[in-house]
Amino acid sequence: MADGYEFVVVANRLPVDRTVGDDGEQHWTRSPGGLVSALEPIVRSSGGAWVGWTGAPDDDTGPQEVDGIELRPVPLSAEDVDRYYEGQSNSTIWPLFHDLVEPPVHRRPWRQAYDSVNRRFAEATAEVAAHGATVWVHDYQLLLVPAMLRALRPDLRIGFFLHIPFPPVELFMQLPRRAELLRGLLGADLVGFQRPHAAQNFLQLAAGLLGLEPDDDRVAYEGRTVVAQAFPISIDVAETDRLAADPDVQREADRLRAELGGDRRLLLGVDRLDYTKGIEQRVEAFGELLAEGVVSNDEVVLVQVATPSRMRVAQYQQLRERVEREVGRINGEFGAVGRVPVHYLFQSRSPAELVALYLATDVMLVTPLRDGMNLVAKEFVAARRDEQGALVLSEFTGAAAELDDAFVVNPHDVEDLKRAIVAALDAPPDDRAVRMRRMRARVQAHDVDHWAREFLAALA
Ligand code: ADQ
């Protein structure tokens, strides 16, 4: 298209996964996940393009159209992946923006790679966007892109959405070249966050670091107005509901329950294996409840499904080892032949399999130490058409602001975790149903499509 695209999404990853067919040819299929399913129809109907990395290092795949979306791959070398992605994005910015749950690592070559990859994303976007087009940039890997893109293309309308928390001023101030990162974001017309508190942190930082003068939810910067607001993300509720209503999925839920010991109550955790998700603290709390005899291996079972994630980063390998050791210890101490208290799956599961697990569950444990939103909590609620099942939810997730009918917990406090698990197990069915009904009403009224439209309306 000679004149470019009217709507461009820019994200670290393209919305497709590569598969190799029986014919040996490579094909691209849409990645699962709410973000892709929400944005895809908007990108397609507006004649849009998506700029991102294919996910494979040293991949020279050229531009191509998949399902009506123009894909513009930004190639990354193995060194870029190492420095920009695993380094600056996932070992510096990720832990710092999550309250220093792990110590961030600072390396100058990582920052240089982050700059140069962000510049390539901005250049690729400047090439494909039509005059006056709307561009939506996503997440912490691309904090510098809005300003770089504006310098190249002042005609564009630029939105940015941060999927993870935005830290308080005193934490952000620890970042080397903090003013440059902040100026990167200020290149956008609209900066969206999961929570109002994050938007306030951002505006306070603009005041403290650059001496700008915010007025309510906006700030004047270089002759423009930058608006900072919260747009809590959600899930594809209709798709989760469809799966939950599917007789095959329901049969699988029944099978899982029987397999785990039909009379045992099921506790479930589903997360990427990430130190922000509070998996260790959750397993530790369960271990203490067993040790104290508050629950027994005959009554309760914990299933923890943890998707492998960022396994080349040392902190993630160490977390994996700690979790596996603790699970082994608990099963060794409290298990019996053919019956263990913790089933730990270091695996990714299909959406249908996850929904079957959600349906089989008595108490869902979503206990991150810090999380921008947490979609698992919303998926669990959307799946429970039977209005049963209880949700234990960390107050440090974005989701807790919306789902305050959950059993809300401070996951840093193992005693509080234990209290919440027991309260959720002991809650009478009608109390659980009242809580679940309220949470379902909230999630149903705010699905991911609603989120995308609100953001784009504010940007327009
Ligand atoms: P994540 O940190 O990845 O997302 P989350 O919001 O929970 O966290 O989303 C995880 C997704 O992966 C969910 O859709 C879940 O179903 C899926 N998933 C988890 N474990 C899985 C498994 N074992 N197998 C298969 N799928 C699994 C980041 C931010 C969040 C924010 C989202 C969206 O950290 O705070 O909610 O982006 O903005």
Image (cartoon, rainbow, N blue to C red):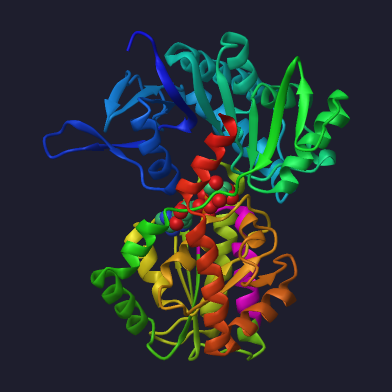
Q: Could you tell me which residue is drawn at 59 percent across and 63 percent down?
A: 279
Q: Could you tell me which residue is drawn at 72 percent across and 72 percent down?
A: 414
Q: Is residue 150 left or right of residue 121?
A: right
Image quadrant for the N terminus? top left
Image quadrant for the C terminus? top right
Q: Farthest residue toward the left?
A: 23
Closer-to-camera residue (410/214): 214
Can residue 335 be seen? Answer: yes
> In the image, is residue 170 above or below residue 210?
below
> In the image, is residue 352 above or below residue 145?
below
Q: Residue 173 location in percent, x, y?
A: 82, 34
Was residue 271 drawn as part of the magenta stretch in this picture? Answer: yes
What is the tally of numbered marks visible in this picture?
0
Q: Residue 434 location in percent, x, y?
A: 56, 80
Q: Residue 295 location in percent, x, y?
A: 58, 89
Closer-to-camera residue (159/268): 159
Q: Residue 427 location in percent, x, y?
A: 59, 87
**What are the residue bounds of the magenta stretch?**
270-288
Within the image, what quadrant is residue 182 found in? Answer: top right
Within the image, what quadrant is residue 435 found in? Answer: bottom right
Within the image, what quadrant is residue 143 found in? Answer: top right
> In the image, is residue 357 above or below residue 292?
above
Q: Is residue 227 left or right of residue 334?
A: right
Was residue 198 drawn as part of the magenta stretch in this picture? Answer: no
Can residue 83 be seen? Answer: no
Magenta residues, dominant SS class: helix
